[in-house]
Amino acid sequence: MFGDEILVDKAKNGKVRPWKEKKLANLTYAEYLQILEIKKAFRVKKCGNLLTFTKSENGLKLYQTWFCKSRLCPLCAWRYAMKNSYELSSILDVFYKRYPKSRFLFLTLTEENAKQGELKETLTKMNRSLYNLFKYKKVQKDLLGYVRSTEITVNRKEKSFHQHIHILLAVSPTYFNKGRYLSQDDWSKLWQKARKLDYKPVVNIKTVSDSKKDKSLVASAKEVAKYQVKSSDYITEDVESDLEFLKELEKALFHKRQLSFGGEFKTIRKELKLEEHEDDLVHVDGENTSAAETEKIIFLWNNEVKNYVNWIE
């Protein structure tokens, strides 16, 4: 039966984790899937219904639950973002020890918005073009490693999608030597060539600190690791429009990876065996807690109070 304790799960910095908000959004997402007659609707609705935490003097730590792992599920997307941020930080820590003189760049590749009905094909072409971009000698010569992600925002007024790629690049110090440095204009021309565009795309390239502890590098890493699509883009008060965009996003993101690694980043990720736990959304910070050593507490989603309430067996 239900107890009288409402879930309050705090991160190390004291910030309360948004379990309630994400679950409410998850239920709306499940409802939308049901309207669209997408089979996974029932599975999505059950996502994160029952949460088992270990309880200690340090607070709560998620020990066990079941996640649907649907790409656009607000609960799962939030957990994936946390997991991606932790894993990328782990990779950067190892990389920086091996290449202390390396430098980092943050590259954003954009192009014209994809109209409704064109997103899936556009994303496929962008991924292929990115592969070609990294094969160019001008890019390859000083490149040590990279991680990239695709972010999509919805433009409701124009009924289109703004798709762009964020890339954190690690390069050797020689990249900044005369004759080797690539300006923003150079990157724009290279992306235009790789993408086979008949116009010059907007590209942004900036240097971030060569210190792994610097805030600018941390911010760049988080930008790559964040949500692919924010749930607020397809869950609004305009249900009819939400359904149109969600239907296309579901098709476009099917079997599309959220993060892709290359060079030394890919090698280190393999060494750390991070791909073996790719879908583990419980231990997003890499720590495993033995429930036998600490007290357990269960929280169950309560539709009446619209929050997680402790469950007394």
Image (cartoon, rainbow, N blue to C red):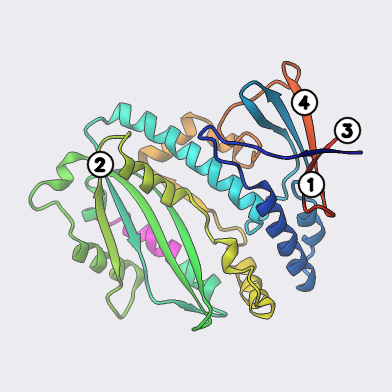
Mark 3 sits on what residue?
312
Up the image or down, 194 lies above or below 181; here it is: below
| Nearer to us: label 1 or label 3 | 3
Mark 2 sits on what residue?
209
Which residue sits at x=36%, y=68%? 110
Look at the image and give the residue range highlighted in magenta.
Answer: 126-136
Which residue sits at x=45%, y=39%? 88
Q: Do callouts 1 and 3 mark residues in contact (Cβ within 8 Å)?
A: no
Q: Amino acid at mark 1?
A: Asn
The label on residue 296 is 4
Residue 231 sits in which quadrant? bottom right
Mark 1 sits on what residue?
49
In primary-sequence order, the first of circles 1 and 2 is 1
Residue 223 is situated, as x and y percent measured from the top left of the image, at 42, 51
In primary-sequence order, the first of circles 2 and 4 is 2
Q: Do callouts 1 and 4 mark residues in contact (Cβ within 8 Å)?
A: no
Element at label 1: loop
Residue 30 is situated, as x and y percent measured from the top left of the image, at 75, 62
Q: Residues within 10 Å of mark 2 (few under 14, many from 20)?
A: some
For the residues marked 1 and 4, what is the alpha-carbon distance in whole angstroms? 16 Å
Q: Is residue 135 magenta?
A: yes
Which residue sits at x=88%, y=33%? 312
Q: Residues within 10 Å of mark 1 (few under 14, many from 20)?
A: some
Element at label 4: strand
In primary-sequence order, the first of circles 2 and 3 is 2
Q: Amino acid at mark 4?
A: Lys
Up the image or down, 186 lies above or below 86; here it is: below
Give 158 or 264, whichever is nearer the viewer.
158
For the residues marked 2 and 3, what is the alpha-carbon distance in whole angstroms? 50 Å
